[in-house]
Every structure is written in C-alpha cells, then in structure tokens.
Amino acid sequence: MESNVLHQQKAMPPTAEGGWPIGSARLFAADPLAFCETFIPKYGGIFQITSVFFKFIPQFDWMVVVSDPDMVKQIMQDNNRNYVKSHGYKVLELLLGQGLLTSEGEFWRKQRRLMQPAFHRDRMAAFVGIMAHAGEEMTNKWKALPDGSEVDVSKDMMEMTLNIVCRAMFGTDVSDAMEVVNREFDRANEMLITRITTPVQIPITWPTPGNYREKNTYAAIKKVVADIIDKRRNSTERYDDLLAMLMEVQDEETGERMSDSQIQDEVITIFLAGHETTAVALSWLMLCLEENPEVEAKLLEEAQRVLNGATPRIEHIRELEYTRMVIDEALRLYPPAWVIGRHAVDEDEIGGFYIPKNTNCLIPVYYIHRDPKHWPNPLAFIPERFSKENCIGRHKFVYFPFGGGPRQCIGNGFALMEMQLIVAILVQHVQLRQIKNFKVKKEPMITMRPSPHLRMTKWNRNL
C-alpha cells in the first residue's frame, strides 16, 4: 500500500531516448564514456536507460544513471543498506567468490571487520621497503636501456604492482606462480567484462567451448592461490605478511577464523583490486606528466628536495605533498574504477524521483570527476586543485576514485602510498615521452585502461 502511494506521488526519472528494442542501453554499451558525456548534460543528475533485454536478467527491472553528488551520497552512504552491489559484481563472483568486493550484508561486515587491521597505516609502514625496492628495480631496468628505447609502460607497471602485492601478501618469492596469475588475469578481465555487458548470457554451467576456456582461466588463478595457502598451512616457518594476518585473525565476537576458501577469495580480490587499478593509474599518470612538463618539473624539484636520491622511507610520505596532489589529479581525470553499480533491494526516493525495487543504479565516476559544474576547466591537469585549502568544503562525492561510504576501498591507503613512492623514485631518474603518431584511447573494461598498451620512449635524466 505504502509503495503504491509513493509511486503515485513521485514520478520516475526521465528516460534517455533510444530506439526499440534495445533502447538507450545500446548506446551505453557501445561507448559508455561518450554516452555519459552526451546524455548527462541533456537529462541531468538522474535518468533511466532502457532495453528490452533487461527482462532477461534476474532482478534487473530498471536502470538509472545517477551523477548528482547528493543523490550519489544517498545511495553510497546515507541509505547504503538499501543498495547492494549490482549485476556486474555478481558476475565477478565467478572469479572473486565472496571476497570483500563482492560479498554483502552481515557476512561482508564481518569480513571487513576482520581485515581492517591489515590495512591500518601503522601496518602499511612495513610495506614501504617492498614498494620502494620494486620501484627502484623497474627504474633501473629502464635506465639500463639506451636512450630513445620504447618501453611498454602498461605492461611494466602491471608487473611491478603485481610484484609489490605478491611480496606484501606472501613475503617470499613466488614469481613462477605469479607469471600464471598475471597471464590469466588478462584473460579473466576480458571474459568477465564480456559476460557483464552481454544482454543474454549463456550460463557458465553450459558445456560450450567458450565456457570451458573461461572456467579453466578462473580455475588456474584459484589453483595457484590455493596451492600457496596449502603450502603455508604445512609450513613451520613464521611469516609477517598479509597472508599470515588473514590466516591468524579471529573475530572478536565469535573467535572464528577464516576458512581456506574464504582466504583464497580475499587473496584473489586483493590481487585484482591491489595491482590492476594501481598499474592503470600509474600508466595514465605517466602520460599526464608528458603532456604537462611544468607539472613534471615541479614534481622533480620536490622529489630531489625531499629524497635527494635516497630510497624513500615512511617519514617522506607527508613531505611529498605535491606528488600526492599530482596523483589525485591523475585519478580525477583517469579513475581506474570508472563506474560504480548499486542495486536497490527496496524502493526509495532520490532527488524527488521514485526508485522502484530492483533498480540498478550506475554511478559514472569518470563523468562526475570531469563535470564542469564541479570542476572549473575540467579537462586541464591542475594538481593544485588538491591543495589543502582548495579541498576545504568540497563535496566528498565529486571526487571518489576509491568509492565512498562504508564500502570505500579498504586498500586506498596502500595504493596511494605505493603511487607516491613509485612516482618520486621514477621522476628523479627517467623521463618518458610520447611516441610520434602513437595514440591511446580510454578502454572502459573492469578498469579504465589505456588501449592499446601505453608505449613511450625512455630518456635518462642527467642530474
């Protein structure tokens, strides 16, 4: 009764135009970034996307795009318990199981409570050496190449961040196993995004050649992690790494520990969220520096003044203020997590509009970060936007590269510290320059990657 009254009193959000039968969803699927840039200014902070194919997706009755910061805050923070992870995250369960990224409700809250201490700032300090060592390894690899050599920035950043998360997770060298993970993650990324964006899905249980390859990819990743956990269970050595913490932590209320299968899900989740997003962000940042030499010069000045060629330590993080501003500005223009999805488990009212149960809400982080209503000269690379004085009074949901509300990324501190250290090391020794006629575009998959892989020429600094 109450639902009918609310529906009668409040109108649904406006509907974006699109031809039958696929509707405006066809335009979104074809180019989601261009879709947002075209339709959000036309329809405003909330509007519907339509498609006849929605009826084939369970609990997917409606779809709305929500870009108004107050409305986003309602979904992600104020009324967050009414909005669970959306359809796409259900697909990710094929690989991530019930890790923090995909789990819900009380189970998620328990897991978040268990894992939070591992990502406390004091604990993160133990990983500074790992991050700095990996950054110096990659810098030395590039320095050893002749000036003018082409480097695959995307590939090298991905390998470096995977190396960091492996050492932080496992402590010891597991490079052979990680070669498998690195290779299979690329395949898994493409398979998962295809499954997310395909209107009518073939259930993965069906015995098709494509499903066979897909299941083998997920199984290969899971086996690598399961073998490492099993080996650790049978070891008598003492470890001080993330895996040891996950295996030892107990729920304060129940005394319960995580099962090996749950540890596996969390490890794979950390791999995906902990290296892919950071590598993508660093790749875009390298391009931003090349396009903005005055920013690169200020970054170099700070790195030389703070570090003076020394290996960075935890106490240097606060001093690398401009470096952090540069990273924030790169994450504004090129957020790896370019869209967030939430699913309404019950009806709601947002911005004066009626939101029925089973409405899927797409939150276009990429567009919000570039919305001229919130960002003067939005396409310009201006790190000073993130000075302390310029951040005062800024709405928290006009800049949220790590999400927001209770489900903000648990590893955001790890990622930001990692990027500060890597950038400060790299900029002192190497310059990267664009290759003539080499063009990259933004590829919005699970993360917003450069496509093709970002390749640049390398030049050593003569300091």
Image: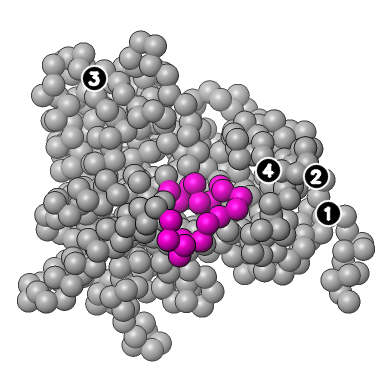
Is 184 displayed left or right of 66 in the figure? left
Q: Badge 2 local density, few (<14 within 10 Å), some, or many (20+)? A: some
Tell me the CA gap for discs 3 and 1: 53 Å
Q: Compare marks 4 and 2 and give the one earlier in the sequence.
A: 2
In which quadrant of the rendered image does the N terminus lie? bottom right
Tell me the CA gap for discs 4 and 1: 17 Å
Where residue 77 appears, as percent x and y from the top left, is: 61, 61
Mark toward the viewer: 4 or 1: 4
Residue position marked by numbered label 2 in the rendering: 15
Q: Residue at x 31, y 61 (%)?
A: 219
Q: Compare marks 4 and 1 and give the one earlier in the sequence.
A: 1
Q: Amino acid at mark 4?
A: Ala
Seen from the viewer's position, the closer of residues 173 and 179 is: 179
* Placement of 379 over or under 78, stated as above or below: above
Q: Badge 3 local density, few (<14 within 10 Å), some, or many (20+)? A: some
Where residue 178 appears, as percent x and y from the top left, is: 20, 51
Residue position marked by numbered label 4 in the rendering: 25
Residue position marked by numbered label 3 in the rendering: 150
Q: Badge 1 local density, few (<14 within 10 Å), some, or many (20+)? A: some
Residue position marked by numbered label 1 in the rendering: 12
Seen from the viewer's position, the closer of residues 133 and 367 is: 367
Mark 3 and mark 4 residues within 8 Å of each other at the beta carbon: no
Question: Which contiguous range is marked in magenta?
Answer: 191-208
Q: Amino acid at mark 3?
A: Glu
